């Protein structure tokens, strides 16, 4: 089975846990009892697909800023189709389809399922994805959609109107996001939510892409990506295709896009250090800080604390957070990288202090800075520091100083933690030069 997972932009509705590079699908909200740890939406999606089909080829269509988080959470045994910039879903899906054919070598007559990376679903959803793939392979229609059976009239989704109420039916028409009353009428007549899940043979979308875009292959399309017109897959392809099947999905399916909807799916009232007294009602706490949060006498409230900030909100009001967060000019305080993660501890006019975690066997880029000096204080683990080509073993208690202009990296032999202090007249992400590293 071939699957493309669409991993969207940053999103601010789950601030302070989400930020410009940490999207909601990477935040670990859900307890996996077998692992004894928390999982993110992307980890659950990847694991469940592999449970249904261990040989499934999974490709994630995403922006460059998310690649490190993807490799950090699910490893490198996954295809990644990188969008150079945002151009809506049709260019993204065209690029991913070309990537499957030209880079991964998948035959144009094979089927692929495309779906969002972040719905809240259970095992029956992944069985349905497999069935969708099989329907597309049969070729009775150019497109096969999953139609979600609505649980309430919603203004957030477009609607699919099938020809019948059968489990599998041809599509009669599509409807835009309606008002509540219109949505209610659609549902009474058997309409389904359009959850953005569909399947097709690669050749079909490649042909549509060549009709709308002048390109030769994946590399050419990638190079031209910034010039492409922003248009959704629904507008460019789906609503112009007469031969579409829809398969009903009757299981649980939720878009956990706000704190209000997310806390409804949380199995525990708190994650991290939290104390709620017995007068609290319908209160949820997500705390990534190492200090306790105490809640007393609260009702219908969400509390979230991270290095990025602290949110205390009525659950219903939390849905309206975005314009307030958009007005915050904020330093990224936490990010996962392909090699580990970092958390900013302190920021001053001429210094920044960061806790860096490197996973065993990983290393930072070999790099230098023009405008700042750096000091590494190793607090746990073992590794090798390389400073201007010279290798030095490091362990807990070692301190290494790098002057501006000095090339440096560190390679973790075991899991390694260090405190990095940056000191300089100007500290910014642009002050970085990367170099090739020759190391055995």
Image: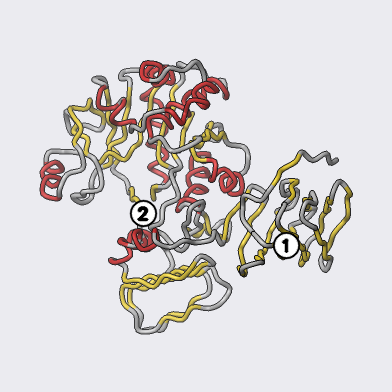
Q: Residue furthest front?
A: 425
- The secondary element bearing badge 1 is classed as strand
Determine whether, in the image, residue 405 is placed left or right of residue 183: right
**Residue that appears at 45% across and 53% down:** 24
Q: Position of residue 186 (x, y in %)?
A: 14, 41
Residue hosting label 1:
417
Figure quadrant of residue 420: bottom right
Instruction: Answer whether residue 264 is visible to the viewer in this image.
Output: no
Q: Residue at x 36, y 54 (%)?
A: 257
The residue carrying pointer 1 sits among few (fewer than 14), some (14 to 19) or many (20 or more) residues within 10 Å by Cα, namely many
Task: Measure the C-alpha gap from mark 2 to mark 1.
Answer: 33 Å
The percent coordinates of residue 2 (x first, y second) are: 48, 29
Residue matched to label 2: 257
Q: Is residue 372 above or below residue 309?
A: above
Give the x, y percent position of residue 295.
Answer: 42, 80
Q: Say whether residue 278 is left or right of residue 437.
A: left
């Amino acid at each position: 089975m071939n699957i493309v997972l669409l991993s969207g932009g940053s999103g601010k509705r789950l601030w302070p846990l989400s930020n410009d590079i940490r999207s909601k699908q990477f935040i670990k909200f859900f307890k996996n009892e077998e692992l004894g740890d928390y999982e993110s939406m992307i980890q659950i999606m990847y694991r469940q697909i592999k449970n249904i089909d261990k040989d499934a080829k999974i490709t994630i269509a995403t922006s460059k800023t998310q690649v490190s988080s993807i490799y950090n959470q699910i490893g490198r045994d996954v295809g990644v189709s990188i969008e150079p910039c945002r151009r809506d879903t049709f260019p993204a899906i065209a690029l991913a389809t070309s990537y499957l054919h030209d880079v991964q070598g998948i035959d144009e007559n094979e089927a692929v399922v495309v779906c969002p990376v972040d719905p809240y679903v259970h095992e029956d959803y992944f069985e349905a994805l497999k069935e969708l793939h099989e329907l597309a392979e049969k070729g009775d229609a150019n497109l096969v959609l999953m139609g979600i059976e609505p649980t309430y009239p919603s203004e957030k989704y477009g609607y699919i109107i099938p020809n019948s109420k059968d489990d599998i039916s041809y599509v009669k028409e599509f409807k835009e996001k309606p008002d509540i009353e219109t949505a209610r009428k659609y549902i009474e007549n058997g309409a389904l939510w359009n959850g953005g899940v569909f399947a097709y043979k690669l050749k079909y979308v490649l042909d549509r892409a060549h009709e709308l875009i002048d390109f030769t292959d994946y590399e050419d399309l990638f190079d031209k990506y910034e010039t492409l017109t922003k248009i959704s897959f629904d507008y460019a392809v789906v609503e112009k295709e007469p031969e579409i099947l829809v398969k009903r999905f009757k299981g649980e399916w939720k878009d956990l896009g706000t704190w209000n909807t997310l806390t409804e799916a949380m199995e525990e009232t708190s994650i991290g250090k939290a104390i709620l007294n017995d007068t609290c009602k319908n209160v949820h706490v997500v705390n990534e800080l190492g200090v306790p949060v105490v809640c007393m006498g609260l009702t219908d409230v969400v509390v979230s604390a991270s290095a990025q900030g602290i949110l205390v909100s009525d659950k219903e009001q939390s849905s309206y957070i975005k314009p307030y967060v958009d007005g915050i000019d904020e330093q990224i305080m936490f990010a996962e990288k392909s090699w580990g993660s970092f958390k900013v501890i302190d920021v001053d006019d001429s210094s920044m202090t960061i806790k860096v975690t490197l996973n065993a066997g990983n290393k930072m880029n070999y790099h230098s800075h023009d405008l700042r000096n750096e000091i590494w204080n190793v607090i746990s683990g073992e590794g090798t520091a390389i400073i201007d080509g010279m290798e030095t073993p490091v362990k807990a208690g070692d301190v290494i100083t790098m002057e501006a202009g000095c090339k440096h990296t560190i390679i973790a032999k075991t899991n390694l933690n260090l405190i990095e202090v940056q000191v300089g007249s100007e500290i910014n992400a642009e002050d970085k030069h990367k170099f090739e590293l020759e190391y055995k």
